[in-house]
Amino acid sequence: MPGQGETEEDHEQQKSKKPADTAFKQQRLPAWQPIITANTALPVFLIIGLTFIPIGIVLVITSERVLEHDIDYTDTNCMSTTAANTTCAQALENANYTGQTCTCRINFALDKSFDGDVYFYYGLINYYQNHRRYVRSRDDNQLLGKEGAAASECQPFQKNSTGSGKDYAPCGAIANSKFNDTLSLLYGSENVSVTNLGIAWSTDKAVKFKNPDNASNYFSSTHDKPPNWKLSAWELDEPNPENNGYQNEDFIVWMRTAAMPTFRKLYRKLLRNSTFQNGLPKGDYTLVVTYNYPVTSFAGRKQFIISTTSWMGGKNPFLGWSYIAVGIVCMITFVVFFILHKTWKINNPFTYQMASIQNNQRITTT
């Protein structure tokens, strides 16, 4: 029943869910409905095709000018220098992955000079850093140097529950699985000078990673190193305090997880001095590997990659070929529809389309 002083009409208006009678809510605003014709659509396909194909060609040529040399050192290419007829992967497996270290030397040649800036990467294949539990297994507050217990997301690498009971620093599966092979390069008998600075994103180092107060005591006394680490975080680069602890650039690079199971991460940059003033000269080289990181148990592979760059970054032909493919599809579409338009041309397409629209409106109203 309507309340006192309330008419039946007022009560019905309160119950109604009908939107207000405005142009906006009743969808009566002025609108422009484009009528797509051959004269408007065909030039669009033509312009896209003529634009994308040259851009794609430029991108492909630029990508091809980037020089790369990949070395897979997972197993047979990396024979132990101390154990006869044994790969380093086998040496680690025979030691039951108890911290055994193996060294191997791989000889290779560069057929071309790598001029300009040269970058060294390590690559991992069949390594799923994008697993949901793996990606979440970190404590960002801890990495910012804030005090407090490690986050529960770090489990089972939150704290040393079988020993001291101290929190791991850093905690989590990402940090515990940090890549720890040591890779160095010889040009004949001369060491190739490299730097481990400037390999991480500057925003990561400045914003996301901070060392706690009294870092030396924090890492050595109040916290334990992760179980798979041989050194604490404060021993990653002791000569350079600005590149130590949570702000170590090798560590920061590793903590930026990859989206795909095959990926590469920047390891070192060439120091352009003396022999290497203009880059890496062609010739014979030796890769010296201190093999610590096991991957064969999950059918993974490891690579050492030498690469130059261009104005568009590293070697990546996919983008250029994508532009070319889209351009070719648009050109084919243009040719097909142009032929159809010329073959079955309608004298007045606007009249035909308006008639179709009106016919559809009649069908809708009935």
Image (cartoon, rainbow, N blue to C red):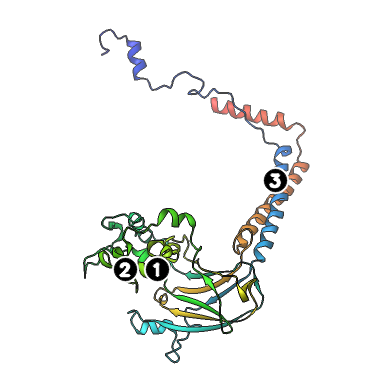
Q: CA distance from mark 3 to mark 1?
A: 49 Å
Q: Can residue 347 be seen at all in this image of the molecule? A: yes
Residue placed under numbered mark 3 in the picture: 45
Return the residue found at the far top. 5
Please say if the residues under marks 1 and 2 sit with CB atoms less than 8 Å apart: yes
Which amino acid type corresponds to the residue marked 1 in the rendered image?
Lys
Residue placed under numbered mark 1 in the picture: 178
Label 2 vs 3, first from the N-terminus: 3
Using the image, tell me which numbered label, if any, was put on residue 86: none
Q: Position of residue 356 (x, y in %)?
A: 65, 31
Q: Of circles 3 and 1, which is in front?
A: 1
Which amino acid type corresponds to the residue marked 3 in the rendered image?
Phe
Residue placed under numbered mark 2 in the picture: 226
74 left or right, relative to 13:
right
Q: Can residue 76 be seen at all in this image of the molecule? A: no
Identify the element where label 3 is drawn: helix
The quadrant the N terminus occupies is top left
Q: Position of residue 129 (x, y in %)?
A: 42, 63
Which amino acid type corresponds to the residue marked 2 in the rendered image?
Pro
Q: 261 or 117, which is in the foreground? A: 117
Identify the element where label 1 is drawn: loop
**Residue 309, quarter of the rendered image:** bottom right
Q: CA distance from mark 1 to mark 2?
A: 10 Å
